[in-house]
Image (tube, rainbow, N blue to C red):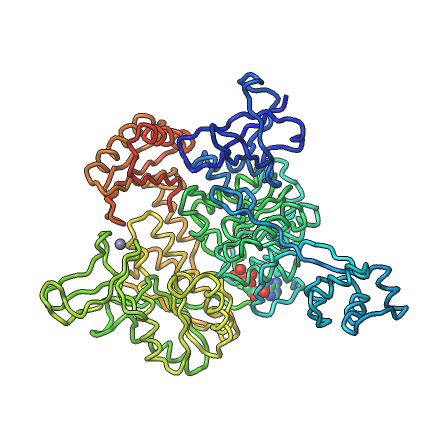
Amino acid sequence: MRVARVEPLTTARALRGPFDYLLPEGFEGVTAGAVLEVPFGRRRVVGVVVEVADSSDFPEERLLEPIRQLGQGTTPELVEIALEVADQYCSTPARALGLVLPPGTGVGGRRVKERTERTCRLTPEGSRALEDGARLGAKQRVALEILGGGAMSTARLAGEAGVSSSTVKRLADRGLVEIGERQVRREPEHREVGSESDGAPPLTEAQAAALERIERALGNRGDGGPETFLLAGVTGSGKTEVYLGAVEHVLSQGRSAIVLVPEIGLTPQAVSRFRARLGDTVAVLHSGLTAGQRHDEWERLRRGEATVCVGPRSAVFAPLEDIGLIVVDEEHDPSYKQESDPRYDARRVAEMRARRNGAVLVLGTATPRPETWLSAERLELPDRVDGLGMPPVEVVDMRDAPPGTGALHPSTIDALATVRERGEKAIVMINRRGFSPWLTCRTCGHHWGCPNCDVSLIVHRDPDVLVCHHCAHREPVPPSCPECSGTTLARSGAGTERIEVELRDLMAPMEVFRLDADTGASGAHGEILERFDRAPSAILVGTQMVAKGHDFPEVTLSVVLDADATLRFPDFRAEERTFSLVTQLAGRSGRGPAGGRVIVQTLAPGAPAIARASSHDSPGFLEGELERRKTLDYPPYSDLIRLVFACEDETRVSALAERAAREIGDRLPPGSALLGPAPMFRARGRHRMRILVKTEDRSDAVTAVREVVEELGSDGALRGVVLSVDVDPQ
Ligand code: ADP
Ligand code: ZN
């Protein structure tokens, strides 16, 4: 007997699969990864086969049979990956399986159909009719003549011949034309950015050495364990050429490759370089695709028509087989962590897939994470390709700014004016959106906060509104203070919108572009970047988005405002984030013959993250940071699991968090510590409590947490409570 173990795709946490079904005749093709519709109680549910076995714990006569198979499903390897993700990130099999199924298959997914079109071609009778001068209308003759050149879609024929579809149908009725159907591929739009030549340039010595080392590892095909490399290359050192060379090598071995990039909307260059070099063997998977495009690209990968997948985080689940190489570009980027259940880290999933496939993993960045620095074999690209040095960085201490200085120091304004004079470009980063972060009444000091969250409302312009950045709350900017009726309201502090307005004013007639979460979806971001690229002389203002891997040779000045803003986050990664933001932004400057400079405005010039970034000293920063992490016992010297309980009822949430902390604490393996519960600020009208587990035994600690969460779930304690469990919180 053949038994399929099926995991139903439901959102319920309590449902514990898999469940056995007997595979009758007609289901021979079913393997792990197949999607089946099965009877379940009185319902029918869709489920994924996680295993096919030849026996069951249940007697054969009690086993039900599946109703039917739905589509091709996913690969057995991806089923294993999904189950491992569910396990490691305290999620459910159903949710994790949703990540690896064809687009539209998961819970609530809408099935996507293939797109087909009608085609027509000339029959032998049709050719004869043309030659014999049979009785044909003028338009009919034109249509047949066009078809004489080859088959085409009916729509195109109708257009070219100027005939209606009923004319075509009449021709078909007379047997002169044959109408068929073919699948049409919905191709993603490809933005061609910059002038990408399609040939490989001769590699620099450092590039060649790095590539050679990777190729040597690829030659081992995973014998002796998977190999992980850190390609530590300063910004502009030509990391992408190394990735391209490695991908070409893997393809020549007949294997496939995955290339992860941070966010496609912000880094369209990456995709266009891969497509320019490797053509249609590249499939892209990202959220900007239509459902149809996504479906077709996924199928191309599944069928092996495309053997390279380029995309953000979710592309790590590309349905490729025999993967030889996984590249994670800009490996420091926080977008590799998914912030909703399953809260997986694509870098860890990349490791899992590399292990199962015997693939080589290449993590590339100018600002490695401490964990990567510590564990991976380093391949260094110490210089920029063009031989230009790194741009000098000037740290401007805002504590010494002359009175009356706003967000921009006078010396920053001077530097920007020089850029304008020379007709060059500048990038200005301030990691805070909106116009200003505080609205207060000058008379009584009243301060506008969110009614649902314990945070300030942010002033936005265009339109004039107060917005909470944690919940959807919005309210009009008031004309006067509700407490004292005072009409002098102060908007203090600056965000991207204010800097944009000030720069328009100060730097006219230079064009100023703004890039942040408020300037549209990812498609719009690509467009803003293109306009900035095309403009003769301009300023790009924005949040951390402006620091991503853009390559604009005319940029001669990068400015970081309030560089220590990210340092003030109560998070052990604040140092690492700040270092990488400042370094990455500095890397945007001076990528052309005109050279470049960098200005870092800060209140904390002595902070290691800022001082080391200013001297382009990654190793120095990392050594110090690792030391600090070791003392505090933070990752990579431990693993973290964070639980956040949120509920409108303050006493309930405290009691629940206390109970969870006690029960988890009782079960944690040795070498673990539990911090909290500690209150967090109220958000979306809910009081929140946080528990943090620090452990040296990740897998047992995750198991302990999962058991407690499941018990709380099954005895009803979690009703009305939002609980998030985050392994490796960022
Ligand atoms: P990184 O990703 O390290 O910041 P890129 O891969 O974007 O750097 O390379 C920076 C620029 O240098 C790109 O325009 C790229 O086309 C060019 N480049 C890379 N390698 C070479 C090379 N060996 N010779 C000439 N130009 C190169
Ligand atoms: Zn709010």
Q: Could one spot residue 237 in this view of the protein?
A: no
The outermost residue toward the top is: 59
Q: Which of the pair 596/33 is nearer the observer?
A: 33
**Vertical relation: 539 (above or below) 254:** below
Query: Percent position (x, y) of residue 613?
Result: 39, 59
Dividing the image into four quarters, tell me where ligand 2 lies: bottom left
> Which picture quadrant has residue 176?
bottom right
Query: Percent position (x, y) of residue 164?
Result: 69, 68
In the rendered image, the quadrant that contains the N terminus is top right
Q: Residue at x 46, y 49 (%)?
A: 336
Q: Which of the pair 254/470 is nearer the observer?
A: 470
How many marks can you see? 0
Horizontal side of 27 relative to 653 (left or right) equals right
Query: Percent position (x, y) of residue 96?
Result: 48, 39
> Which picture quadrant has residue 277?
bottom right
Q: Could one spot residue 506 in this view of the protein?
A: yes
Q: Residue at x 15, y 72 (%)?
A: 488
Horizontal side of 36 relative to 338 (left or right) equals right
Query: Percent position (x, y) of residue 7?
Result: 51, 32
**Vertical relation: 234 (above or below) 41:** below
Q: Which of the pair 516/325 is nearer the observer?
A: 516
Horizontal side of 313 relative to 719 (left or right) equals right
Q: Which of the pair 331/710 is nearer the observer?
A: 710
